[in-house]
Amino acid sequence: MKLSAGRIESFVRRPDPGVRAVLVYGADRGLVKERSDALLSVVTEDPSDPFRSVEIPVEALKSDLTLLTDEAAALSFSGGRRVVRVRGATDSLSEHFARFVESEKTDALVIVEAGELAARSSLRKIFEGAADTVALPCYLDNESKLDQLVHEILSDHDLRASPEAISFLVANLGGDRGVTRRELEKLALYKGGPGMVTLEDAEMAVGDSTRASIDSVVYAAFSGDSPALDRALEKALAEGAQPVGILRSVSRHLTRLHMARGLMSGGRSADQAMQALRPPVFFGVKDAFREQLRRWDEKRLNSAIGLVTEAEMDCKTTGLPAEAVCGRTLIRLAVAARSAAAPR
């Protein structure tokens, strides 16, 4: 069965004992791991106990059609429910999981981790179609969820954050739950104790190389620099950035450009508009942002917003390669930026 977003957290905290297998999948690899680890911890008191938990390598599974069913049927010598875990599953393994679903039911819980799967994925259909299996999606955190997560993690360290710091963190995190947690833990360590996190604190502590690479992608696209865009996109993807996460960053940049253009329509200068944004435009990219404000009028921005929104939907629903969809969209933005700069 397919688990709705509202039921995911409660299921992870207390999985239905009648469920024999869970597919945890999605673009947010950190969240996939976090929820899989949580399920393992709930079912087994000691996840490191080899009698209660076993992981099957994907390559071993590919070469043995009966391995999954055999491991699921094995008894736990120390008592309690056993967990069988498979990481990195893809549609190429669908036959193995279909065979498992049709096999005699056992007491073990099978946890399967996968990356982003399209709606037509054969693996998803297997887990969504059976009554005793669950497909558990892990979507990238939206701004509301990310805002809540930032408050929760900082609160665990007796820290509060200023509105400007929260805005900066929400704008610069969220592509991966694991990375988000590590960056916020790093921020807490940087503060060293209870107190208030300022914008300056957030800027000093948060800013991993992947984030910088994504920013390079965004600025190259909106400046119309195709060679720089190719290099930055290749680097960002190699560092683990996800296509949907890149498109989300593009959307946030579009929103900031749109807000700044609105302030300029109200009589503010470009510099005043950039300073009024929260967080303000970083000094190192002010010249590029100012030039983009000159190129991108509201009509072009509105068209770009529609283009990026459509691209994100295509990544999630069409089954097309997400990297190709993302790359094509960025190229179209770069072409539009150059067209805006061309003399008329």
Image: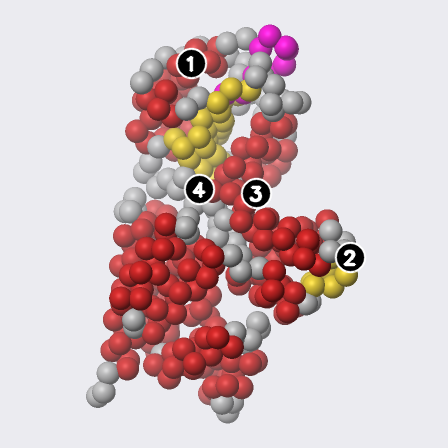
Question: Helix, strand, or loop for circle 2?
Answer: loop
- Circles 3 and 4, Cβ within 8 Å, touching? The answer is no
Overall secondary structure of the magenta section:
loop
Residue name at image x 59 percent, y 49 percent: 182
Q: Amino acid at mark 2?
A: Pro
Q: Nearer the viewer, mark 1 or mark 2?
A: 2
Residue annotated with mark 1: 69
- Is 197 a magenta residue? no
Residue name at image x 31 percent, y 66 percent: 228
Q: Amino acid at mark 1?
A: Thr
Q: Earlier in the sequence, mark 3 or mark 1?
A: 3
Q: CA distance from mark 3 to mark 1?
A: 31 Å
Q: Earlier in the sequence, mark 1 or mark 2?
A: 1
Q: CA distance from mark 3 to mark 4?
A: 16 Å
Question: Is any part of residue 11 visible from this angle?
Answer: no
Q: CA distance from mark 4 to mark 2?
A: 35 Å
Q: Nearer the viewer, mark 3 or mark 4?
A: 4
Mark 1 surroundings within 10 Å by alpha-carbon count, few (fewer than 14), some (14 through 19), many (20 or more): many
Residue annotated with mark 4: 26
- Circles 4 and 1, Cβ within 8 Å, touching? The answer is no
Q: Which residues are magenta?
A: 76-84
Where residue 194 is drawn, which disc sits there?
2
Question: Helix, strand, or loop for circle 4?
Answer: loop
Q: Earlier in the sequence, mark 2 or mark 3?
A: 3
- Circles 1 and 2, Cβ within 8 Å, touching? The answer is no
Question: Helix, strand, or loop for circle 1?
Answer: helix
Nearest to the observer: residue 288 or residue 16: 288
Q: How many marks?
A: 4
Q: Position of residue 202 (x, y in %)?
A: 62, 63
Q: Earlier in the sequence, mark 4 or mark 2?
A: 4
